[in-house]
Amino acid sequence: MINTKKMASAFSLIEIMIAVAIMGIMFALVGPSALKYFGKAKTSLTKTNLSSVKSALLEYQNDIGHFPNKTEGALGGLGALVKMPKGDKMKERWNGPYVDGDELPQDGWKNDFHYATPPAKYKQYKNFELYSDGENNDSDVKNDLHVGA
């Protein structure tokens, strides 16, 4: 007699447990490396954005004759790179926006950059300082990523 019923195929509980255990071991081995890679990517993005904003500040200074100050825009003056400050001098000389888009770039951790002119934290700069507090968003100088002029 021939059995015409087909047997349903399925995974047993042991097979599923073994597959989950193998995947867990793989994630445990690969996970830390992947997280380190993502951390490096955010640091790299921050350095690129710092360089971009520094270039915009230098271009602004070339057009206007000084670096943006606190009265000329939000974020300590960085807003002047996106939106023209008030004043007749600005109407004649402002050639912005000096950064792409409608907003200023942020660091890799989605925090705004700190900007000061004259520099207050990094005495090696004469005109301005621009920095990110880094991954931990703390005020410790050794973790900062910074540029200036």
Image (tube, helix red, strand yellow):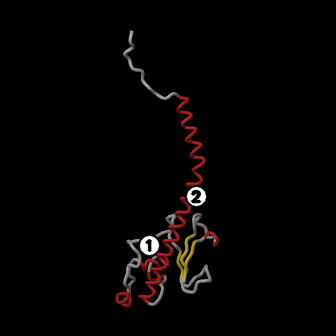
Residue 149 horizontal/vertical position (percent) = 54, 84
Q: Is residue 84 above or below residue 107?
A: below
Q: Residues within 10 Å of mark 1 (few under 14, many from 20)?
A: many
Name the residue at 57% across, 50% down. 30
Q: Is residue 72 above or below residue 102?
A: below
Residue most toward the front? 1
Is 5 displayed left or right of 36 in the figure?
left
Choose between 25 and 94: the one closer to the eye. Answer: 25
Which residue is denoted by mark 2 in the rendering?
36
Q: Which circle's residue, 1 or 2, is located before the other in the chain?
A: 2
Q: What's the amino acid at mark 1? A: Leu
Q: What's the amino acid at mark 2? A: Lys
Residue 60 horizontal/vertical position (percent) = 43, 84
Q: Residues within 10 Å of mark 2 (few under 14, many from 20)?
A: few
Quadrant hosting residue 146:
bottom right
CA distance separating discs 1 and 2: 27 Å
**Quarter of the picture holding the N terminus:** top left
Quadrant hosting residue 80:
bottom left
Which residue is denoted by mark 1 in the rendering?
104
Name the residue at 57% across, 86% down. 126
